Image (cartoon, grey):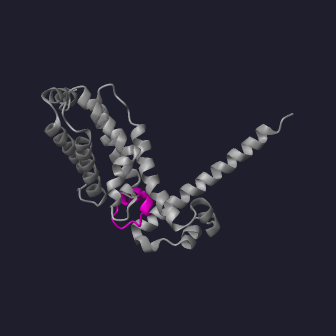
Amino acid sequence: MSTAAPDTAMETAAGKRRNAQREALLDAASEMLVHGGPDAISLRKLAARIGTSTMAVYTAFGGKDGLIAALFEEAFDRLAAAEAAAPKHEEPLLWLGELARAYRSFALANPSYYALMISATLPIPDALRHGGGSDEPAARGVSQHASYQIMRSAVEACIADGSFPADAEPDELAGAMWAAVHGHCSLELAGFHENAAAAEKRFHMTTSAILRGLLTPKGLEKLEKFTRG
C-alpha cells in the first residue's frame, strides 16, 4: 500500500500551520506598527507576542525588511481578495458600486492593514516603491496592485457600455473613485462620523456624488433606475 497519501496529509497539515503562524505574525506586526510606528517593530518582541521564536520570524520573512514588505503586500492582497469576492454584475455600474462597498468593508474589517497601505511613515523597502526608486512615495505604486486593477476594469467596462464618456481616461476615473472611497474610509476609521449609521449614509452620498459628476446622460439614467429600484 502506498504511503503517499499519509505523507501528503502530513505535509498539508504542516503547511497550514506555517501559513497560520505567518498570518499571526503579520497581524501582530501590523498592530505594532500602527500603534507604535516603525520603531515599534522588534522581531524578538513580535515572536514573543505570538509565542514563537525569533528564528521562526527569520524563516518566514528573512528579516525586518522582508516582514515590512510582506505587510505591505498582505494589505493589498486582502483588499484584492475582498474585491474579487464582490458580486460581479453584468451591469458594470453596479459592479463598480459593489467594489466601492467591498473596499469599505475591507477597511473596517482590517483597520491596521488599511492604515499601513499608504502610510508615509512605513519604512517600505525601495524595491516596492513606484519605479523601484527610494525617492518615490509608496502610494505611487498603488495602481500596480491587483486591487486597483480590479476597480480599473470596472471603470473600463463602464466606459465601454456608455455609462462613462467614451474619451475618458480609465486611470483618471479609477483614481477619482479610489481617492473618494479611501478618503471616506480614513475619516470613518478615525472616528469622524457620529455613528456607524451616519458613516454609511455619508459613504453612499459621497460615492453617488462622485459618480454623478462623471457619468454620461445614459449612465445617470441607469443610476437613477438603480437608486429607485
The magenta segment:
112-128
x, y (%) of residue 61? 56, 61
Residue in the foreground of this view, choosing between 77 and 129: 129
Residue in the foreground of this view, choosing between 222 and 62: 62
Q: Is 172 in the magenta? A: no
Residue in the foreground of this view, choosing between 86 and 54: 54
- Residue at position x 40%, y 69% in the image: 35
- Residue at position x 40%, y 51% in the image: 109
Asked whether the viewer can see residue 53, the reply is no
x, y (%) of residue 209? 16, 42
Q: Is 114 in the magenta? A: yes
Q: Quadrant of residue 37?
A: bottom left
Counting the numbered discs, the total is 0
Q: Is residue 16 left or right of residue 117?
A: right
Q: Quadrant of residue 52?
A: bottom right
Above or below: residue 167 compared with residue 145: above
Q: Quadrant of residue 50?
A: bottom right
- Quadrant location of the C terminus in the rendered image: top left
x, y (%) of residue 91? 29, 26
